[in-house]
Amino acid sequence: MLLNQFLLLAAVLFSIGVYGVLARRNGVLVLMSIELILNAVNINLVAFGAYHGTVSGQVFALFVIAVAAAEVGVGLAIVLLLYRNRQSIAVDEVSSMKG
Amino acid sequence: MILAAEEALVAQNIFFGLIAAGTIFGALRVVTTKNVVHAALWLVLVLAGVGANFLLVGAEFTGVTQVLVYIGAIVVLFLFGTMLTRSPIGRDEDVDNPAWYLGLIVAVPLLALLSYAVWDQWGDDHIDSLTPAAAQTTADVSDSIFSTYLVAFEAIGFLLTAALIGAIVLARKE
């Protein structure tokens, strides 16, 4: 199999994730788009690990999965707090710190 | 023997095409659907497709972990988040920014740039995952984690504990 086919799939997923982060207004959907980006990175790590014949790519992909789990936990707690304080999770309304 | 390997390669490429098409379609639905619960369910398809890709290159342990952690835990967390924030369960016309097209202006050139860079650098380099000797077994992964990357592994464990305690503190009612 070509290395490129995995890298291109990852590039497409990454770009879709970037689009989602920028275009979505609902906090939960923004977090889902971030998951797409992290998964694209994981595909790259595992593909390069297989390409070089080492397990380091897989190990780092596992670390990214663990960090993603922590990120979703904290992210959803923040969204929950936002909802409790403002009765809305639209991320563009969170502008108290805008100068 | 060589013929058998080539046939297996064709099968692998067909499966890759199917998986990639499903993954990309699911990802597009995640960022375009108006229904938050449907977005979480399309995310399951994307995560399963990524896990299948891991299996395709012989990364068995990572593929299984992908299914366990992402589909088993993170999607459930998303669904709970949707319920607890009382997002409308049905269609919701208010999930996109008014200026959603700005996302396209960033994402499409980014995709073109990434594709060009990847194509230019790794033209037709191959992954040899068909031979049993090249397969990366779970034992190799665990050996690597608990020797070379032991410090990083402990740091990840600490990070996960700290983040989950932080999440509890944040979400707890006063």
Image (spheres, rainbow, N blue to C red):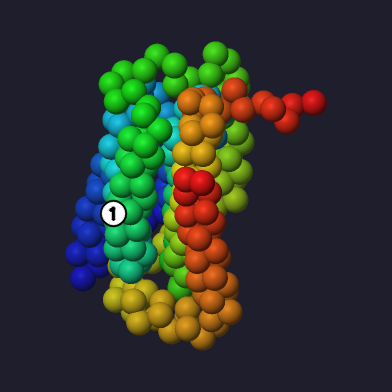
Q: Image quadrant for the N terminus of chain B?
A: bottom left
Q: Which amino acid, mark 1?
A: Gly
- Return the chain for callout 1: B
Q: Residue at x 40, y 14 (%)?
A: B93
SS category of the residue bearing label 1: helix
Nearer to us in this view, B144 or A51: B144
Nearer to us in this view, A60 or B128: A60
* Residue A97 drawn at (x, y percent): 73, 30
How many numbered marks appear? 1
Question: Is residue A27 left or right of B26 when viewed as pictured?
Answer: right
Q: Answer above or below: position of A81 versus B29.
A: below
Q: Residue at x 47, y 39 (%)?
A: A80
Q: Residue at x 25, y 48 (%)?
A: B15
Structural crowding at the residue carrying mark 1, measured as other residues with C-alpha within 10 Å and reported as few (<14), some (14–19) or many (≥20): few
* Residue B169 drawn at (x, y percent): 52, 54
Location of mark 1 (residue) = B72
Residue B6 in view, yes or no:
yes
Question: Is residue A57 left or right of B37 when viewed as pictured?
Answer: right
Residue A45 in view, yes or no:
no
Q: What is the residue that sits farthest to the front in this orientation?
A: B174
* Residue B60 drawn at (x, y percent): 31, 67
Question: Is residue B17 left or right of A23 when viewed as pictured?
Answer: left
* Residue A45 drawn at (x, y percent): 50, 59
Nearer to us in this view, A26 or B138: A26
Q: Residue at x 43, y 84 (%)?
A: B143
